[in-house]
Amino acid sequence: MPTFARDQLEIMAGRILQGAGVGEENAKIVAAELADANAVGHDSHGIIRLTQYVESIEAGEVKSGGEMHLVVDLPSVAVLDGGFNFGQVVAARAFDIASQRARESGA
């Protein structure tokens, strides 16, 4: 069985996702997370998921690039509607919002 470096997995996953219609930025986020999962030994959450992800895109279950918006927007609390994007992409955006809110509120 061939062995691939983490960077090779990320590049391959990104290309597959882009081939399935995922924008470059979102493909990079998802590919990096999948490659990281494999790199730390969580293969069940790594690039093995690509087939499922492509099928979910084709079935309309995942809408990469869908509009995300805040449902609750308070100084120290936010609820983000991910718009059926990949969880990795929504989590990255939520982390950015949470980090910004923490800085602004002094947390």
Image: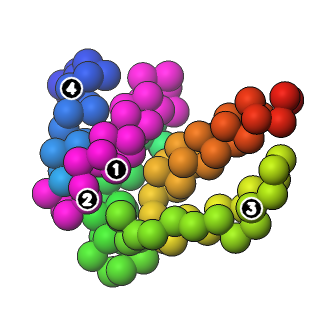
| Disc nearer the start of the sequence (2/4) | 4
Answer with left or right where residue 77 lies relative to residue 4.
Answer: right
What's the distance in space between the residues labelled 3 and 1, CA to CA? 24 Å
Label 2 near label 3: C-beta < 8 Å?
no
Q: Tell me if residue 48 can be seen.
A: no
Query: In the rendered structure, which segment of residues is drawn in magenta?
Result: 19-42
Q: Which quarter of the figure is the N terminus placed in? A: top left
Q: Quadrant of residue 105?
A: top right
What's the distance in space between the residues labelled 3 and 2, CA to CA? 28 Å
In percent of width and height, residue 34 lies at: 40, 39
Q: Which quarter of the figure is the C terminus placed in? A: top right
Q: Tell me if residue 22 can be seen.
A: yes
Type of amino acid under label 2: Val
Badge 3 crowding class, 10 Å Cα cut-off, few under 14, some 14 to 19, many 20 or more, is few
| Disc nearer the start of the sequence (3/1) | 1
Identify the residue shown where x is 21% and y is 26%: 8
Type of amino acid under label 1: Asn
In percent of width and height, residue 62 lies at: 41, 70
Helix, strand, or loop for circle 4? helix
Read off the residue under disc 4. 8
What's the distance in space between the residues labelled 1 and 2, CA to CA? 7 Å
Helix, strand, or loop for circle 3? strand
Read off the residue under disc 3. 73
Label 2 near label 1: C-beta < 8 Å?
yes
Type of amino acid under label 3: Asp
Read off the residue under disc 1. 26
| Disc nearer the start of the sequence (4/1) | 4
Read off the residue under disc 2. 22
Helix, strand, or loop for circle 1? helix
Identify the residue shown where x is 38% and y is 52%: 49
